[in-house]
């Protein structure tokens, strides 16, 4: 298998690596369920969670994953960090890397923030915990583990409904579907559907009801109001729920074994009705549970066997041009 | 000559019989002043140890003993994560009974450095506090790096350090093979 040094996104991974992480994740589920939830696997490793965007589940999940494997975990969020005082992303990254952590987990609103930092921080493994509308690999690995435990994903049709245009989860699923052998249907109003998204090999729908027959999983996305700008108009919440919300009627129209997933946080009454969210067909809390196991697998894979990897040479120096671009982004 | 069969099927089967007898004898009363244990708890170490534990369990149940079975995977407790990386073939640990207060027989196929056993004891303590842990191995190949020794050894063979010693199982026959590594 190709060794994993960083986890940027599904786009850099191959099937073998994904299956390896799923296998590893599956064996961590048990540790999270037993009374003493601690293993010494990552003793002596330091993990820094650097979150420039708000997050509860992903950050908690990474924190628990590290702590349950005995690593030392430090959380930094943008509201308390020096970025508030005007420090650039690169300087924050280099400062933290100088403290010699093994893994830096980063969430940032700019797509590609992790790859950018990795070019300059030679010795630290970087995990993408969501970058802009680009990728969210650990969420997709989590979903695949949940699907595997619920009967497998190969040949299944996953129908992703909601704000596709701003969704890193949808994007990562499109990439993973090709690698792992499942189909993706996308459902969104025209204003929230990226142009020419069919090129990823998915089916595109604008009416939710048309996409329901033949779906094995209905994957609801949160309306990301923080990313909506004037040029992608959004109707009222009530109207959205009418047209694209998953209610009991729509769930009844789906095939018998059709399952419901949501990457969280959910807005009940917007993209998903309360009775559906609490139904036996919803795997939403399974996803949360498996999220911890998958993140344990990712951290273990990145920390393990690093003596063989060979460290990269001196890290890149920043050009004036790049510094200018960075300044304009932040 | 690179591959040598150290023990053929018959020798392995006889060793398993001897291990089962030894374990059954201890149940009758481990020490004169200790009360007899009512049930036998066998915990195999994935993967070879689990197969040995299955074979021992089968023999014990044929003679009417009641057996609790569990398996442990020690991959996440190894001390060599930095050098070899995580094991790609991790098997789930499966301990369907509470280990607290139990007398546990830890079962492995080949005993070598003792590091696997140390890790397995760490795993067991993370599940509870057993009253005692004893070790039964099918083959002791020598070369210990830790102060660990088995309470019950099926076979003995001093293997050179540049060799691996493996239990090879097919559906019909079991044998133990020594292989030279380059």
Image (cartoon, grey):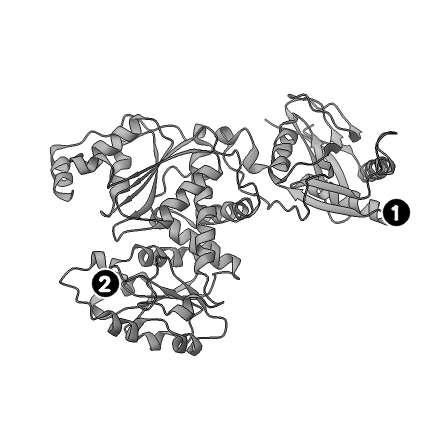
Position of the C terminus of chain A by quadrant = top left
Q: Is residue B78 above or below residue B59?
A: above
Separation (CA) of disc 1 from disc 2: 69 Å
Mark 1 residue crowding within 10 angstroms, few (<14) / some (14–19) / many (20+): few
- x%, y% of residue B143? 68, 21
Task: Decide if residue B55 is on the left or right side of residue A101.
Answer: right
Q: Nearer the viewer, residue A165 or A322?
A: A165
Quarter of the rendering containing residue A82: top left
Identify the disc placed on residue A220: none
Question: Could you tell me which chain the residue with mark 1 belongs to?
Answer: B
- x%, y% of residue A199? 28, 62
- x%, y% of residue A28? 52, 45
Task: Decide if residue B24 is on the left or right side of residue A325.
Answer: right
Q: Give the residue at x 37% y 48%.
A: A58
Q: Is residue A324 above or below residue A179?
A: above
Q: Secondary structure at mark 1?
A: loop
Mark 1 and mark 2 residues within 8 Å of each other at the beta carbon: no
Question: Could you tell me which chain the residue with mark 2 belongs to?
Answer: A
Residue beneath label 2, please?
A: A194
Q: Is residue B66 above or below residue B35?
A: below
Q: Give the residue at x 27% y 51%.
A: A134
Task: Decide if residue A180 is on the left or right side of residue B33.
Answer: left
Say if residue A2 shows up in the picture.
Answer: no
Quarter of the rendering containing residue A160: bottom left
Residue beneath label 1, please?
A: B63
- Residues indicated by labels 1 and 2 sit on the same polypeptide chain: no
């Amino acid at each position: 298998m190709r060794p994993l040094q960083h986890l940027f996104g599904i786009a850099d991974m191959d099937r073998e690596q994904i299956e390896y992480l799923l296998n590893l994740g599956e064996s961590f589920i048990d540790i999270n369920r037993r009374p003493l939830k601690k293993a010494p696997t990552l003793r002596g490793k330091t993990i820094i969670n650097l979150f420039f965007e708000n997050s509860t589940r992903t950050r908690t999940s990474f924190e628990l994953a590290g702590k349950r494997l005995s690593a030392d975990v430090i959380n930094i969020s943008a509201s308390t960090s020096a970025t508030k005082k005007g420090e650039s992303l690169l300087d924050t990254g280099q400062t933290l890397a100088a403290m010699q952590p093994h893994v830096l987990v980063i969430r940032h609103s700019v797509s590609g923030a992790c790859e950018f930092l990795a070019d300059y921080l030679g010795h630290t493994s970087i995990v993408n915990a969501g970058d802009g509308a680009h990728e969210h690999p650990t969420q997709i690995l989590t979903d695949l583990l949940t699907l595997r435990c619920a009967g497998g994903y190969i040949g299944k049709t996953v129908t992703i409904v909601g704000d596709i245009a701003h969704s890193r989860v949808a994007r990562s699923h499109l990439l993973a579907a090709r690698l792992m052998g499942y189909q993706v249907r996308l459902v969104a109003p025209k204003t929230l559907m990226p142009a020419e998204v069919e090129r990823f090999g998915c089916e595109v729908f604008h009416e939710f009801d048309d996409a329901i027959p033949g779906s094995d999983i209905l994957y609801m996305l949160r309306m990301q109001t923080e990313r909506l700008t004037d040029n992608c108009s959004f109707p009222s919440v009530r109207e959205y729920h009418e047209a694209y919300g998953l209610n009991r009627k729509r769930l009844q129209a789906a095939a018998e074994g059709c399952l419901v997933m949501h990457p969280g946080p959910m807005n009940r009454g917007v993209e998903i009705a309360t009775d559906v969210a609490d139904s036996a067909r919803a795997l939403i809390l399974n996803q949360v549970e498996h999220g911890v196991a998958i993140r344990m697998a990712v951290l273990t894979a990145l920390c393990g066997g690093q003596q063989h990897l060979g460290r990269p040479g001196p890290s890149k120096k920043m050009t004036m041009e790049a510094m200018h671009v960075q300044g304009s982004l932040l | 000559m690179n591959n040598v069969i150290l023990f053929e099927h018959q020798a392995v089967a006889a060793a398993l019989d001897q291990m089962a007898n030894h374990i059954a004898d201890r149940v009758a009363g481990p020490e004169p002043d200790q009360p007899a244990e009512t049930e036998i708890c066998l915990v195999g170490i994935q993967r070879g140890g689990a197969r040995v534990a299955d074979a021992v369990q089968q023999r014990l149940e044929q003679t009417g003993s009641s057996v609790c079975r569990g398996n442990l995977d020690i991959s996440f407790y190894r001390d060599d994560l930095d050098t070899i990386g995580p094991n790609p073939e991790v098997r789930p640990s499966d301990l369907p009974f509470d280990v607290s207060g139990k007398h546990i027989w830890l079962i492995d196929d080949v005993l070598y450095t003792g590091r696997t056993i140390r890790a397995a004891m760490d795993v067991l303590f993370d599940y509870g506090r057993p009253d005692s842990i004893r070790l039964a191995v099918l083959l002791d190949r020598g070369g210990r790096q830790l102060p660990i020794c088995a309470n019950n050894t099926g076979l003995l063979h001093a293997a050179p350090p540049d060799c691996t010693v493996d239990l090879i199982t097919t559906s019909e026959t079991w044998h133990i093979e020594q292989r030279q590594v380059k």
